[in-house]
Amino acid sequence: MPGEGTPTWSGDVLVVGAGPAALSIASELGTRGVSLAAIAPQDPTAPWPNTYGIWSEEVDALGLGHLLSHRWSNTVSYFGPGGPATGEGADRDGLIHHGRAYGLFDKAALQQHWLDRCAQAGICWHRGQASAIHHEAIASIVSTSSGEILQASLVVDATGHDPVFVVRGSDGPVAGQAAYGIVGRFSADPIPSEQFVFMDYRSDHLSDAERREPPTFLYAMDLGEGIFFVEETSLALAPPVPFPALQARLHRRLAHRGVAVREVMHEEFCLFPMNPPLPDLHQRVVGFGGAGGLVHPASGYMVGSLLRRAPDLAAAIAGALETGLRGQELAEAAWAGLWNPELRWKHAFFRFGLEKLMRFDEARLRHHFATFFRLPLQQWSGFLSNTLPPPDLLQAMVALYGQAPWDVRWGLMGLRGREGKLLLAMLSGWANSA
Ligand SMILES: Cc1cc2nc3c(=O)[nH]c(=O)nc-3n(C[C@H](O)[C@H](O)[C@H](O)COP(=O)(O)OP(=O)(O)OC[C@H]3O[C@@H](n4cnc5c(N)ncnc54)[C@H](O)[C@@H]3O)c2cc1C
């Protein structure tokens, strides 16, 4: 039975994992004087595999702008069909200048930033794979695959999108954001020099039949010195768009612009769930990051949320420990600190929105985004970072509806599939958050 034997460590909080979520919450808990350990199969200094991008203002607002390795002020998207102009002045590209800087994390610097804070707090790192958990009235006992036993008042599961201990419920198929990307050198610049392309939805390289398939877009960065990152991305689909399809589309898109890949320095295979329901907030293990449902269900972003919300979760845990809460009460206080009613309502809102977008065909999706990114900057950026209060979010969506062409409006009206259920969840969440 898990938990039998003498624990090799015993304290307030055990963080499971060593990814961005684990390090961010561990570093915040450490600064609050919580006695803390973390466990992961790899050395916590091992390099992370993913590239993490973010709108620069989000890190600047936290005083962490120095953690970006690249910053682009020339940020654009394309929401036109693409192809040669058919009439005078016809804008086939649908070019939009975002007027807002985008950044790429120096992921080693971000990791070191959190590790330094963990070290200052004297966090105790254990190496191993957490494999079983057993709860007693006031403590949880975790065993590892190598037989180590760790005991804590609270366990924070930060093991990513398929968590080891947090139970994620299901209410239907989960959409995945899928992307295939290359960092490399090319026969010609795939995008203009010093530019960041957030979404290039032009589809003139595809046949009519292919345009009826699930839409994908290009996300691309000029990394300098002749190196570019180009990634073909499907915002969300259940089941996800397969990697070979994304890879083929990326090469088609590049070839259409007369660009060939000369050297592949790194390939990125990106796949993570976008819209699972929130975990049950009454379970004994608290989740953070992918495990805690922090991915923005309509955009896929998460790192900004980790930075903004780790302090709230850490404060809730430290406060509850200080007032003597233990066991179930401690876990519930932590979950409540992470997911207040307002955030829960917004999660339901974004899930409903994504469900709508996933039904949009290629042209309608382009029209939708062209309208969305013409909203005032504070509205579209607040939507993407999940920082708008609910009334402002609703105001932004009313504005979007008012300015959208009719095909988008029709697409937003009516309820299909599980949209009714998601709408009901959103409405009942509104009542609780008001
Ligand atoms: C390729 C890719 C690119 C992405 N790009 C962005 C982006 O640009 N911007 C953005 O905001 N988001 C992005 N995301 C989404 C999200 O931010 C990432 O998925 C992020 O890595 C999730 O962080 P996490 O710490 O929750 O999980 P992970 O990064 O998956 O870390 C999980 C950790 O738990 C450990 N672990 C797993 N099982 C156990 C176990 N049993 N015991 C102990 N430890 C265990 C793992 O070793 C790892 O250390 C991207 C996702 C992917 C896949």
Image (tube, rainbow, N blue to C red):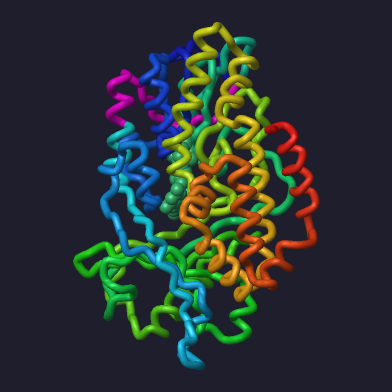
Residue 339, how many percent across, how many down?
60, 31
Residue 216, how many percent across, how many down?
53, 69
Residue 239 can be seen in this image: no
Instruction: Classify the position of the C terminus by image quarter.
Output: top right
Height in image: 234 above or below 349?
Answer: below
User: In front here: 104 or 392?
Assistant: 392
Residue shown at the point (77%, 38%) measured from the top left: 428
Instruction: Classify the position of the N terminus by image quarter.
Output: top right
Height in image: 197 above or below 134?
Answer: below
Count every numbered label the image shows and give the total.
0
Query: Magenta stretch containing residue 122, yes or no?
Result: yes
User: In front here: 217 or 424?
Assistant: 424
Residue 301, how many percent across, how many down?
49, 49
State the residue lying farthest toward the top: 324
Query: Magenta stretch containing residue 302, yes or no?
Result: no
User: In front here: 109 or 132?
Assistant: 109
Q: Left or right: 262 with respect to 252? A: left
Question: Which quarter of the picture shows residue 73?
Answer: bottom left
Height in image: 236 above or below 16?
Answer: below
Residue shown at the point (61%, 86%) measured from the top left: 208
Residue 351 can be seen in this image: yes
State the residue lying farthest toward the bottom: 87
Residue shown at the point (50%, 93%) measured from the top left: 87
Q: Left or right: 155 with respect to 225? A: right
Question: Which quarter of the picture shows residue 259?
Answer: bottom left
Q: Magenta segment range?
A: 115-133
Residue shown at the point (41%, 39%) measured from the top left: 20
Residue 120, how many percent across, how many down?
28, 21
